[in-house]
Image (cartoon, rainbow, N blue to C red):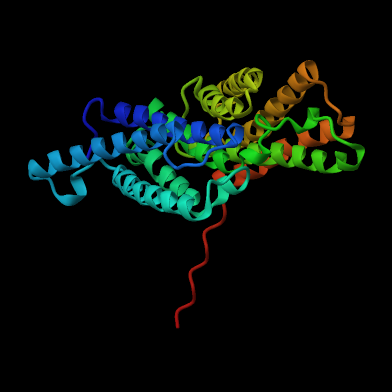
């Protein structure tokens, strides 16, 4: 079942509202240490976004049911799981409220991995990927912008969990630490670059395994995700770095035209993209804050990010293999 006109745009807009509420709540947990209640303005933004999505999807489903549609056609293809996600999100919100009443308000890392919040984020992933699932099942190779934004919100769901070691949140290469702690800061910095490379490149390669991307898609993915992450610690200058890095990756993609039928360009792009973005990030830190890393760490972290992208390309598009021999008859 195809979505009616304006349906996907509305879902995307409401999903952005919901995701913004999640990151706004994360900002509050980081900067407002005296949060002592579940009922906060930040939760109001988060849960009102979920409620708006639930009402919109449920109303659409009930309207289609009244028109005599079968249960599997009450919502456009791909959006049934989004409605399930809304229900799970509501359940998670109730659990989260009682969890706060019993165990108090979480701070720092425990706020990310408390069981109610994990349930909320799993539900969030189901909700925001509706447009991506719908586009995946429709004919055509060119990715619609709704699918690109949906993939961006999926990426932002992942990065919400590892914000404690995100390059756009914690600028470890430029951190001034005691000599005894320098090793740990270096390890966290390199690990953050590696994980963000895997998440960002993995989502982009996932899209490229099915679609051709309109120019600007990677800039949108990196920029929107970067805006959410960079705002957590007011690293607003790094948001521009994410956007420029995404544009450079768009240029590489336009030049190489990677895809399932152009495997070598895909692998080259999967290496060049992370190398360019990591290089730009470290150069920007050096120019604005100064980096305390030795050159070997600079160069090594850049090359490792490229290697991660290259290896991920083998998951996105696997090498051709000979047909398996038929099993001998018994």
**Residue at (45, 49) in percent of width and height:** 122
Name the one closer to the observer, 265 or 29: 29
Residue 101: % across, % down: 46, 51
Name the one closer to the observer, 219 or 122: 122
Residue at the outermost bottom position: 330
Name the one closer to the observer, 20 or 128: 20
Q: Left or right: 50 with respect to 120?
A: left
Answer yes or no: is residue 143 visible: no
Query: Which image quadrant: the N terminus?
Result: top left
Query: Which image quadrant: the C terminus?
Result: bottom left
Q: Is residue 326 above or below residue 46?
A: below
Which quarter of the picture shows residue 193? top right
Q: Left or right: 124 with respect to 188?
A: left
Which quarter of the picture shows residue 158? top right
Q: Is residue 207 above or below residue 109?
A: above
Residue 202: % across, % down: 57, 40
Answer yes or no: is residue 106 visible: yes
Q: Is residue 152 above or below residue 133?
A: above
Residue 111: % across, % down: 56, 46
Residue 12: % across, % down: 36, 30
Q: How many marks?
A: 0
**Residue at (51, 41) in percent of width and height:** 36
Which quarter of the picture shows residue 149? top left
């Amino acid at each position: 079942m195809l979505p009616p006109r304006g349906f996907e745009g509305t879902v995307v807009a409401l999903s952005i509202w919901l995701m913004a509420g999640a990151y706004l709540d994360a900002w509050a947990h980081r900067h407002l240490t005296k949060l002592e209640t579940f009922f906060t303005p930040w939760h109001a933004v988060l849960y009102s976004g979920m409620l708006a999505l639930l009402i919109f999807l449920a109303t659409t489903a009930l309207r289609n049911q009244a028109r005599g549609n079968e249960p599997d056609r009450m919502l456009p293809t791909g959006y049934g799981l989004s409605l399930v996600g809304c229900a799970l999100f509501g359940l998670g919100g109730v659990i989260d409220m009682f969890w706060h009443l019993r165990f108090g308000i979480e701070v720092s890392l425990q706020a990310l991995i408390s069981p109610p919040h994990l349930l909320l984020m799993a539900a969030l992933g189901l909700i925001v990927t509706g447009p991506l699932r719908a586009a995946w099942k429709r004919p055509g190779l060119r990715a619609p912008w709704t699918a690109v934004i949906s993939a961006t919100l999926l990426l932002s769901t992942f990065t919400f969990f590892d914000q404690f070691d995100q390059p756009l949140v914690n600028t470890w290469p430029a951190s001034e630490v005691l000599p005894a702690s320098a090793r740990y800061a270096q390890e966290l910095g390199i690990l953050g670059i590696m994980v963000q490379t895997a998440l960002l490149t993995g989502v982009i390669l996932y899209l490229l395994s099915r679609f051709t991307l309109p120019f600007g898609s990677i800039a949108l993915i990196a920029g929107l995700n970067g805006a959410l992450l960079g705002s957590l610690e007011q690293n607003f200058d790094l948001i521009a770095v994410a956007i420029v890095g995404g544009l450079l990756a768009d240029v590489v993609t336009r030049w190489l035209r990677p895809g399932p039928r152009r495997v070598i360009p895909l692998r080259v792009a999967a290496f060049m993209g992370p190398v360019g973005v990591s290089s730009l990030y470290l150069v920007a830190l050096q120019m604005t804050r100064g980096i305390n890393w030795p050159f070997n760490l600079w160069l090594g972290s850049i090359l490792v990010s490229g290697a991660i992208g290259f290896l991920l390309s083998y998951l996105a598009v696997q090498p051709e293999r000979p047909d398996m021999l038929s099993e001998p008859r018994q």
